[in-house]
Amino acid sequence: MESLVEFAIDSARSMGAEYAEARLQTDLRESIIMKNGVLEASAFEEYRGLGVRVLVNGSLGFASINILRKRNVEGALRRAFRMARLASKLMRREILMGKGDLGNDKVEVKPRVKFADVDLDSRVSLLKEADEQAIAAASARDVRVPARMTSLDTWITEKFIATSDGANIRSVIPRVALFAFITVFHPQKGPVQRYFNLGETGGWEVAERWNLPKLFYEETYALSNILLEAVKPPEGKMDVVLGPEVVGIVSHESCGHPSEADRILGREAAQAGETFLKKDSIGLRVGSPQVNVADDPTLKGSFGFYIYDEEGVKARRRILIKEGVVNEFLHNRETASVFGVESNGASRSVAYNREPIVRMANTFFMPGDYSKEELLEDVRDGIYIKNFMEWNIDDRRFNQRYVGLEAYKIENGELKNLVRNPVLEITTVRLWSAVDAAGKDLEFQAAYCGKGDPMQGIPVWTGGPHIRLRGVKINGA
């Protein structure tokens, strides 16, 4: 079937395309969903098809098929050409496909334990054992855990990408993902809830390494402690230490999304929102010199891993904020041509029938020089927010709000009692400007980043070290 990709490129050229790309993609996915220790559903899905994109009269057209025959490829190309020609009548400026480091390569992540070697019963048994440990942890603190929902997904994505200007990429990427939602309840204290995601590139060995029974016990026990022991947080201006989970979502939402070049050009305003950054914001100071935020698809084992993007451009680490200053944006080849730069490989698509758009991969605050203990010891009176219960951010990614879940009072450099749901409500620039130190630890969390219309939820990592903020305002929930 790879010959269909070459046929699509050749046909597009003969039909007069200024540029053409074709992507043959297959996704094989196996999912199980468990609710309160009972298997709710199991599914095996296969998505296979070809997406084509052409540049005609200075406009792009996209179409896809899942019947892989030459006549269907020709039909998809005709639809893409028609779309491009119609759109060209509305274009204020012609689209150009900018330069990039195009590859001719094969990328394959080889699992140590193949998914096919692990049957359904073994997968269900693992989740049941994890669920039993959640119940055991709640019992140890004399609370109930009335609602537990878990899903475990394994899938393999195979792609063959070719472009009319020479890119030729084959890839095989396996991934494992887990979603868990746990509710702990006490008759006098009420409920407290927690959700978390795990996700990596690799085979079943990833799920084994996670040690889900131990993880579910620890998460439920921590929730029980919060429910039984947390008290009202102090309010007012104080120093705050944020854990890697909070730092990761802040980096993703208030740095990664604003740095997407298509959003800067106004392309996502009606779907995923706008940005406070402008085309000339490179060099703008948005934080203290201790703030360095990167996006890196090439991190081995990461949930957002790739070596070449959907336009055949080789990926690299993108330094979005360097020492508190906006350093670069995320680009595909189209936006790169508008900004007069080279694509940095940020074109991604979730499936064969979705057009590639500018996306993040693994966005994180880069580590500093401090240990967690050193960050804490210099705080006389403050709050440590380890993880979050909820977060909110406006369409321009400027005003934001984070509600802590597991959080502690800091007194004279030591962690004291648990506090219930401290709220950090702050602007992007104020938050990054308050950072005076970053830890040398680095942790990642998995997520699905939503963007586009139709919506594309794509695998990413968010992460960072512990960081310290000076003199920010904390409220109670």
Image: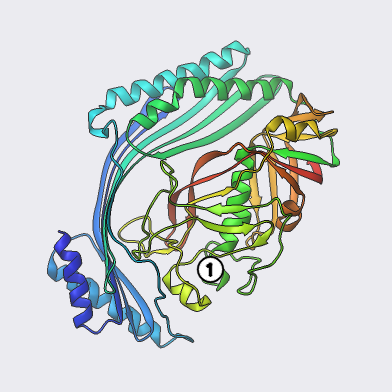
Q: Is residue 268 visible?
A: no
Residue 155: x percent and y percent? 31, 42
281 versus 245 height, above or below: below
Outermost residue, front side: 369
Residue 180: x percent and y percent? 49, 32
Residue 215: x percent and y percent? 50, 24
Q: Nearer the viewer, residue 319 or 460?
A: 319
Q: Is residue 379 left or right of residue 1?
A: right
Q: Which residue is mark 1?
A: 261
Question: How many residues crowd around disc 1 within 10 Å: few (fewer than 14), some, or many (20 or more)?
Answer: many
Q: Nearer the viewer, residue 306 or 314?
A: 314
Quadrant in the rendering for residue 119: top left
Quadrant housing the N terminus: bottom left
Q: Is residue 375 visible?
A: yes
Residue 372: x percent and y percent? 69, 32
Q: Nearer the viewer, residue 365 or 358?
A: 365
Identify residue type, mark 1: Ala
What residue lies at 64% left-to-right and 29% top-to-bottom?
Answer: 192
What residue lies at 31% left-to-right and 78% top-to-bottom?
Answer: 19
What residue lies at 17% left-to-right and 60% top-to-bottom?
Answer: 2
Question: Circle 1 sits in a helix, a strand or a loop, which is it?
Answer: helix
119 versus 142 height, above or below: below
What residue lies at 45% left-to-right and 61% top-to-bottom?
Answer: 346
Q: Is residue 272 left or right of residue 425?
A: left
Q: Is residue 159 left or right of residue 234?
A: left
Report the coloring of the rendering. Answer: rainbow
Quadrant housing the C terminus: top right
